[in-house]
Every structure is written in C-alpha cells, then in structure tokens.
Image (cartoon, rainbow, N blue to C red):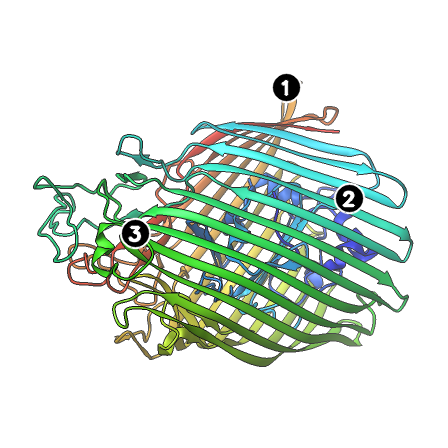
C-alpha cells in the first residue's frame, strides 16, 4: 500500500504532468506505447530522454503485474533482488545492497517514500496500494539523492489529492485463508484544499507447517495501515503537501528454517548424535530428534512472532519564483520491530533469540530547481540535505544452549548484546545540463557528503566477560557524475556516463567496541555506463539497453557470526553487466514486455577469515535474470471484457555469502548457495467500460516451485560438527490463488 518516491517534484506543475500521464506499461488511445514521465532527476522528464538506466512502472502497469508489495519488484525489473529475513528487508541492485542490517549500518540501495529517504530496511516490507508509480534507478546516484545510493535508488510515489470526488475499494480472498480489504477516497474540500485517505487490512495463515502441536506456523500475514495527504494551494505559485502514514506488520512473519541436520547426523534424518560438551544435545530419552529438511516444514516448540511498525510524517513545500522553484522536504519517521525466533529449530528448549530495534529519523532537504523546459540550453539544480537518525538494537539469546556463556548477565539462562547509535549526515549538491546543440546534451553533477556515527556497544562474551563502551567514526566524501547524450532521431537516444558513489561507514553493534572491526569503513564505487533508448515502428516497440562496469573499493559485506551479523570491508570487487528492457504493442489486443540482465560480479584477490575470495561471486547477485510478460484482451460474450496476463521470471543460482560454499551436507555442514528457479503468475481481469466494478482471478507461482529467498550461514557455531555454521533459509511464497473484486467511483 505504501512505499517511496523520488523528490518533491510531484507537487509542481511539471510533476502534475507526470501524474496525469498514462502509466508505464500501458498504451494511449491509438494503441501505441505511451510516453512515461518520471522525476528521477528531480524534475518531470520523459523517461526516454533521461540518460540513466531506469525502470518505471505506473499504477495500472503495477496492478496488471500483481504488484502489492515491494518484494514483487524482483520480478519486474532487471538486476534487482529483494527479499526479507524476519523483520529485515534485503535489497540488492547490481550486486550492491545492505550489508549491515543493524542501526549501525546503512543500505546501499536508497529507498525513498514520496521523496523521503528511509534509513531502516524495515521500511520496505509493507503492502503497496493506490500507487502513482515506482521508479527504479540502477547504478550509483551520487549527486542528487539523499544518502548512500551506491547501488541505486527505489523511489515510490503514492497518488496525491486531486480536485474531484472519487475513490476505489477492493476485497481479495485466497487460499491459506487469506483475506484483504483496501480503500482510497479523494475529497476536494475547496479550490485550495484537497485530501486523500487510504487504508488497508490483510490476514493470512502461514505457509509453513509446524509439526509440534500448538506451535506457531511461520510465513503468515497480519498487517494493517493508513495513509493521508492534505494538499494546500492557496496561490498559483505556492503549494504545500502534508502527509502521514502508519503501517503495522504482525503475526509470526517470515522465520528461518534449518537446512542442515541436527548435530551427529550422517543421513540428514537421524539427527541426534553425541552430546556436545557443555551444551544440551538433540536426544530425547536417548532417541534422536528428526529435522524435516523439506521446505515449509519444521518442528519448533518455542513461540515465534514479529511486531513491526513504521510511521512517516512529511511536509513538502514548493514556491515558484518564475525562473526557478524552491522546494523543501521536511520529514520525520519512526520504525520499530520486536521478534522472537526459535534458534534451535527443534522441539527442545535449547535456544530462543529476541530481537528489538527502535529508530527515529529527521531529514530536511532544500532544492532550487530551474524552470527551463527540457529542451532549454541550460537546466540546473542546487540542493542541501541534512539527516539525523538515532537507533537502538538489542539481541537477547536465551535457553540451555547458551547456559555455558550465561554467567554474570541479566538475561535468565542467556546473554544479550545491545547498542545505540546516532547517525548524522549533511550534504551539498548540484547538477547542470547544458545543450551545445539541439540534439546533444552534457550533464555534470557534484556532491559533498559528511557522515558521523557515535554510539555505545554493550554486552557479554567469552573474554573479557563483559564490555560496554563508546564506538564511532566520521567520514566525508566528494562524489561526481559526468554524462553526455545524443538524440540520434526523435525516437533514439544514446548516452554514456561516468560517476562515483559513496556509502557511509558504520558500526558493528554486536561486538566489543575495542575490537578492530567494531567500525567498518565507507564503500566507494567508480561506475561507467553506456545506454541506448529507443521507440521504434511508430511507437509499437520500446527497447532500452544498458551496459555498465562498476569498480568497488572497501566493499561492505556481511558475515553471520555466532551472535549475529557483522559487516566487514573487502578490498574490492568488480561488477559489470548488460541489461535490456522492452515493451511491444504489435496489435490492439496483444501487449508484450520484459527485461533481462547478465551480471558478472566477482571479488578481487583478498583474504577474509583466512579464505581467499579471489574470483568468488559477490553475494546476493545472480548471473542471469529474466522477466517476460504478455497480455491478450478479448470479449467474454456480452458479459464483460477480459484480459489474460501471464508473467514468467527466471533467476539463476545465488551465493548468499562471500565465501561461496556450494557443497551441502555431508561434505559441509551447510552451503550458502540457493539454486536457480522459475516462476509463473497468471491473472484474468474482468471489466466493463460502463461499469464501476472490476474482477480478477489470479494464481501466483503456478507450478509451486521452491524459491529460496535468503540463506544465512554463520562462521562458527559450536553445535555444528566441523565448524562453518548452520545453514538457515527462508523461502518465497508457494502457489497462491484467489480472486479480487474492485469498485471505483
């Protein structure tokens, strides 16, 4: 229902044009492919004239493809991977993502909600509804966007108030006892004031079967949220948009499953084995416990749950000076999550992990944007940005398996690790485009960024027996972008660019502040890109190509240690690839679209944890991805007009850690490799032009294929023979089906 956007430009007259333009992936009245207007560069522009690799999908196109949460974007854009692990979202674009998910780290793919940068990865988990469009910018965005966009930016734009009374409502029923209701209402109060209110509620039973009587079933849904906008336009040259949103996600949520046998097993089923000194073992009255290794099957006795929430408040102001427009984006956001997980993955009381995080942020952005048209000899933007975030994170480990290290702590039968951190960042940026010739443009951008992080880490570990102390760092960086583009014909644009990107350093909150890796360094990138954008055959075919090469230094990556995730710096990595996107409208009743990406992402020579990473694939980065969709329109007698939509996607195998451990048990206690998978979704839409009612029948993951969403494998758990850590996974949803009824007025 809710998500992000580019900048504040959506209130201006330029952005109103973007809102009234036909959505990406639809066609105009002639049946041709419609031009798409985006605000990726903080001004409204035709996407085919923007020298950036960017995917844009409007509300209608998103609905046609079944978009109801940001996790589905993986199937809609090239080089993008998005999944969640418990309450945390992992977003990776062109090999770069968020490699420290605590409050001490920052994402590498910036996430913007109506122009507001959201610092915590919990912000990507909520449902999506009443969407204007989603813009996905690939590659570093170092000269225009708030923070840390070394991998790219996802900008979610919600629908804003209009000047007519209108609304829409839909209700959905599906398997796993799923139900959802959503509604949006637009109310114009006067010529100068208009409002829009959106709300949703959804529930679903869990996908995962728990063999323990009374045990909780994971992968359920229990979510609700509201959003409101008030648009004030007291004069023709001033506007103010006041916005608020609150989203709550409850239930059990996404919980990991153990994909390796319990200690002592040689078959994967007889999972008892000899006791581990000092730790409880997996024997019950001498009989070994059995771990069901099938996806969506587990046997956990401890209660599991999640309670996640996100609140956002913002004020977007614009004042038209004639030659330029001044824009201000002021925002406050607060996120919180609490979760409990059974960490022994068994019917025994060996271990439970309680996670708690609270964070709140304030941001202020000022922009001065020239009002010259897109073909003017000079366009420019100047801006300043300030961001402050305070976060607290605690991990509490309870249960018998932690008793040996539980002395002198305040958690019964366990221990805790905690930390608080305050992040401050400010930046000044500018970008200008000059047009020496009618068809030739040159763009240059510059940004200065200063970051500070200060906090306190506290907890218990083996030696010394306890710790508590300050930890922090500060960094600064100048980044820039140079691009040139040439409009060969009215339908074909070519461009090349060179840019640099920077992501702040951070704090590992789960370790002693005196250790050398308590603070990790910033990540930087040098990126080259060339692209071609075209609309051919009288706008019946749109074909966009991009080739890139990114060289990363001090690449941040994550290792799952015995007591949580820790971020490290690799000396470097090279990510290069090719991407293609197309839309085709060969006839009035047939539409085709798709995208694909080849990504070569490898580490440079370096030793990490005494492992040589040279040539290893960068984690969370498949070599091949492909998406292909099509729809046909046809009459269903005199009852309704029908449209059948089929979407196919392919993702090649993915390593989820830098170590690229591919051999499963018994060669290794676990691997960090997820196999390739294919997915097919089918949707049948029913509507009549003279009726406000619409209908939809849908089946997602039609062939019920197993699709791994995340793999976590640690660097050393004492209860796994041979070391190397247990392998735990989450899975993307199995087959789901249902129907939706909608009403508009």
Q: Quadrant of residue 443?
A: bottom right
Res 305 label: none
Between 101 and 402, the one nearer to me in the picture: 402
Q: Quadrant of residue 451?
A: bottom right
Quadrant (top left, top right, bottom left, bottom right) of the N terminus:
top right
Quadrant (top left, top right, bottom left, bottom right) of the C terminus:
top right
- In the depicted structure, whether residue 49 falls above or below residue 480: above
Residue at the spot of label 2: 161
Dot 2: element: loop
- In the depicted structure, whether residue 401 falls above or below residue 636: below
Single out the mark in the foreground, 3 or 2.
3
Res 262 seen here: yes
Res 637 label: 1
Mark with earlier residue (3, 1):
3
Res 33 seen here: no
Mark with earlier residue (1, 2):
2
Query: Could you tell me residue 75's position as x and y percent?
Result: 50, 49
Single out the mark in the foreground, 3 or 1.
3
Crowding near the residue tagged with mark 3, few <14, some 14–19, many ≥20 C-alpha atoms within 10 Å = few
Between 48 and 326, the one nearer to me in the picture: 326
Relative side of 10 to 294, left or right: right
Res 412 label: 3
Dot 1: element: loop
Q: Quadrant of residue 604?
A: bottom left
Mark with earlier residue (3, 2):
2
Dot 3: element: loop
């Amino acid at each position: 229902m809710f998500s992000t956007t580019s900048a504040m430009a959506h209130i201006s007259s330029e952005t109103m044009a973007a809102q009234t333009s036909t959505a990406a992936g639809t066609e105009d009245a002639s049946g041709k492919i419609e031009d798409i207007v985006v605000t990726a560069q903080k001004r409204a522009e035709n996407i085919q004239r923007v020298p950036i690799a960017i995917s844009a999908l409007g509300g209608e196109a998103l609905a046609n493809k079944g978009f109801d949460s940001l996790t589905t974007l993986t199937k809609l854009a090239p080089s993008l991977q998005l999944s969640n692990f418990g309450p945390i979202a992992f977003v990776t674009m062109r090999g770069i993502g968020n490699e420290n998910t605590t409050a001490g780290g920052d994402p590498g793919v910036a996430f913007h909600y109506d122009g507001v940068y959201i610092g915590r990865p919990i912000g990507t988990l909520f449902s999506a509804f009443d969407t204007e469009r989603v813009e996905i910018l690939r590659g570093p965005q170092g000269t225009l966007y708030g923070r840390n966009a070394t991998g790219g930016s996802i900008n979610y734009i919600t629908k804003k108030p209009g000047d007519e009374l209108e609304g829409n409502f839909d209700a959905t029923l599906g398997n796993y006892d799923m139900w959802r209701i959503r509604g949006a209402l637009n109310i114009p109060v006067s010529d100068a004031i208009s409002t829009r209110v959106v709300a949703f509620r959804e529930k679903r039973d869990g996908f995962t079967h728990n063999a323990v009587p009374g045990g909780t079933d994971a992968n359920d849904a229990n979510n609700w949220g509201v959003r409101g906008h008030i648009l004030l336009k007291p004069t023709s040259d001033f506007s103010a948009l006041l916005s608020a949103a609150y989203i709550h996600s409850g239930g059990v949520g996404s919980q990991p499953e153990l994909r390796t046998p319990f200690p002592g097993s040689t078959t994967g089923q007889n999972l008892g084995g000899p006791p581990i000194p000092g730790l409880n073992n997996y024997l019950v009255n001498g009989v070994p416990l059995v771990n069901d290794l099938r996806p969506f099957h587990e046997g956990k006795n401890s209660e599991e749950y999640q309670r996640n929430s996100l609140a956002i408040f913002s004020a977007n102001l614009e004042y038209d000076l004639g030659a330029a427009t001044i824009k201000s984006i002021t925002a406050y956001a607060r996120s919180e999550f609490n979760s409990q997980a059974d960490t022994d993955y068994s019917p025994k009381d060996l271990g439970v992990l309680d996670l708690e995080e609270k964070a709140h942020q304030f941001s202020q952005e000022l922009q001065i944007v020239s009002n010259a048209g897109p073909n003017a000899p000079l366009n420019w933007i100047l801006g300043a940005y300030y961001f402050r975030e305070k976060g607290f994170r605690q991990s509490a480990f309870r249960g018998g398996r932690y008793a040996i290290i539980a002395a002198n702590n305040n958690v019964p039968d366990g221990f805790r690790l905690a930390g608080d951190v305050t992040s401050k960042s400010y930046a000044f940026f500018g970008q200008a485009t000059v047009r020496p010739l009618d068809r030739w443009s040159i763009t240059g951008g510059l940004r200065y960024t200063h970051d500070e992080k200060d906090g306190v880490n506290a907890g218990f570990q083996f030696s010394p027996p306890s710790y508590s102390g300050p930890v922090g760092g500060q960094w600064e960086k100048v980044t820039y972008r140079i691009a040139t583009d040439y409009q060969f014909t009215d339908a074909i644009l070519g461009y090349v660019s060179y840019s640099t990107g920077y992501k702040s350093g951070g704090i590992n909150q789960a370790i002693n502040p005196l250790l050398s890796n308590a603070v990790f360094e910033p990540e930087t990138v040098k990126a080259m890109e060339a692209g071609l954008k075209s609309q051919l055959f009288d706008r019946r075919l749109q074909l966009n190509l991009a080739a890139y090469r990114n060289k990363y230094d001090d690449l941040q990556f994550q290792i799952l240690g015995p007591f949580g995730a820790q971020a490290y710096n690799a000396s470097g990595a090279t990510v290069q690839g090719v991407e293609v996107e197309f839309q085709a409208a060969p006839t009035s009743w047939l539409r085709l679209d798709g995208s694909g990406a080849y990504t070569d992402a490898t580490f440079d020579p370096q030793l990490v944890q005494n492992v040589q990473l040279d040539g290893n694939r960068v984690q969370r980065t498949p070599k091949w991805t492909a998406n292909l969709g099509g729809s046909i329109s046809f009459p269903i007698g005199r009852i309704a007009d029908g449209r059948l939509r089929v979407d196919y996607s392919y993702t090649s195998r993915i390593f989820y850690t830098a170590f690229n451990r591919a051999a499963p048990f018994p060669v290794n206690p676990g691997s960090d490799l997820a196999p390739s998978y294919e997915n097919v979704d089918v949707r049948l839409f029913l509507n009549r032009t003279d009726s406000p009612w619409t209908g939809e029948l849908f089946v997602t993951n039609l062939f019920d294929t197993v699709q791994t969403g995340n793999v976590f494998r640690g660097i050393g758990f004492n209860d796994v023979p041979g070391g190397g850590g247990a392998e735990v996974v989450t899975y993307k949803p199995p087959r789901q089906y249902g129907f939706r009824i909608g009403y508009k007025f």
